[in-house]
Structures are given as C-alpha cells and as structure tokens.
Image (spheres, rainbow, N blue to C red):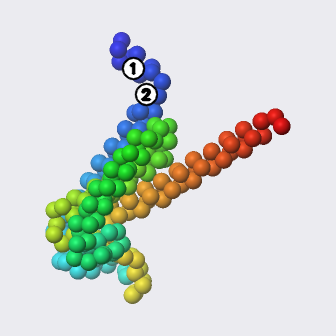
Amino acid sequence: MRDQESSALPGNGDLAARLWLTLVPIVVILALDIATKAWVMNTFELYERTPVIGDFFRFTYTHNRGAAFGLDIGEHSRIFFLILSLIALGVLGVLYRGTPSSDRLRVLAISLVSAGALGNIWDRIRLEAGVVDFLDFGIGASRFPIFNIADSAVTVGAVLLLISFWLEGRREREVAAAAAEATPE
C-alpha cells in the first residue's frame, strides 16, 4: 500500500525522469570515456595517427595538460584545470539542485557537462601527462583541436544548457508580456 501511495504523490514521475536523466548519461559517458581512453592508451603509441575516414577523421593519441581543445597555461595547467573542474562541478551541483524536475533539458545538460568534467578529472588525477585525447578531425593541416568523449559531452551539454536558459528567458518574457496585456489601464 505504501508503494502505491508514494507513486501517487505529485511529481514522482518527474523525480524518476530526473534521476534517469542524471544517472544514465553520467554512467554511460563515464564508461565510454574511460573505456575509449584505455583502449587508445593500450592500442596506440603516443602521437600515433591512424586514419579512420581518410585524412578527415583519424585517431591521434596525445595528452593534454590543459583544458578542452588544447588550452594550456603552462606547467601548472593540469592542477589549475583540475581545481577549476572541481569548482565547476560544485557550481553545476548548485544549478542542478535549483532546477525543477520538469526542466528535463536542463537536467540532461547539467548531467552531460558533469559527466564530461568527471571523465577529464579522472585523467588529471591519475595521469601526470594530463587528459588523453584522440579524436582528430580536419583536412590536411587545417585540423580541429584533438579531443575525447568527455570533451564532447561537455560541449554538447553546454550548448543544451545555453538553449535551456534561452528557452527559460523566452518563457519569462512571454509571461511578462501576457501579464502586461491583461493588466487594465
């Protein structure tokens, strides 16, 4: 009887969806990130380039002490970006707690960014050389900075987070406009 009562509570479906949109992306992204980085480290020599789709897409094993897409600030980059990533996770936690369960886009976005941050934090803690990067896109000498699954999750999550904030702002402007129209002069 108690299970029936708790499932009948308002918002329980939202809570289940929130947990699903939080835990599944984090577990999947972390598993993929850790597995692909281990595969790269065990399969390729450092700086080895292996074509996948000709020169356009290849695996290039490298390490990055800095942030996503090769941002490096010198010899202390690894520690600096480790601390910055931990602070970012704290901010994401606060944002997550303040996000209603009904805002599934924002919950998913926070989960993706968090998963990517955790994947790269794991590398920064365990590897003196820094984060393992291996996804290499481009044509000839014109190449996108080499990245990994975690970087992809952070990027996609950040874009979704921006869209979520934009949609929230648009909804608030629509509500304000409707309230202004409904107010008698």
The image position of residue 76, as x and y in percent, is 22, 72
The image position of residue 60, as x and y in percent, is 28, 76
Vertical comparison of 173 with 85: above or below = above
Q: Residue at x 72, y 38 (%)?
A: 179
Q: Answer whether labels 1 and 2 touch (C-beta < 8 Å).
A: yes
Residue 37 visible, this angle: no
Residue beneath label 2, please? 12
Q: Nearer the viewer, residue 103 or 144?
A: 103
Identify which amino acid the numbered label 1 is placed on. Answer: Ser
Residue 9 visible, this angle: yes
Vertical comparison of 58 with 114: above or below = below
Q: Residue at x 34, y 74 (%)?
A: 71
The image quarter in which residue 157 lies: bottom left
Pick whichever of labels 1 and 2 is earlier in the sequence: 1
Q: Nearer the viewer, residue 139 or 129?
A: 129
Vertical comparison of 63 with 155: above or below = below
Q: Residue at x 37, y 76 (%)?
A: 145
Q: How many marks on residues? A: 2
> Circle 2 sits in a helix, a strand or a loop, which is it?
helix
Q: Residue at x 33, y 50 (%)?
A: 90
Q: Which mark is residue 140?
A: none
Residue beneath label 1, please? 6
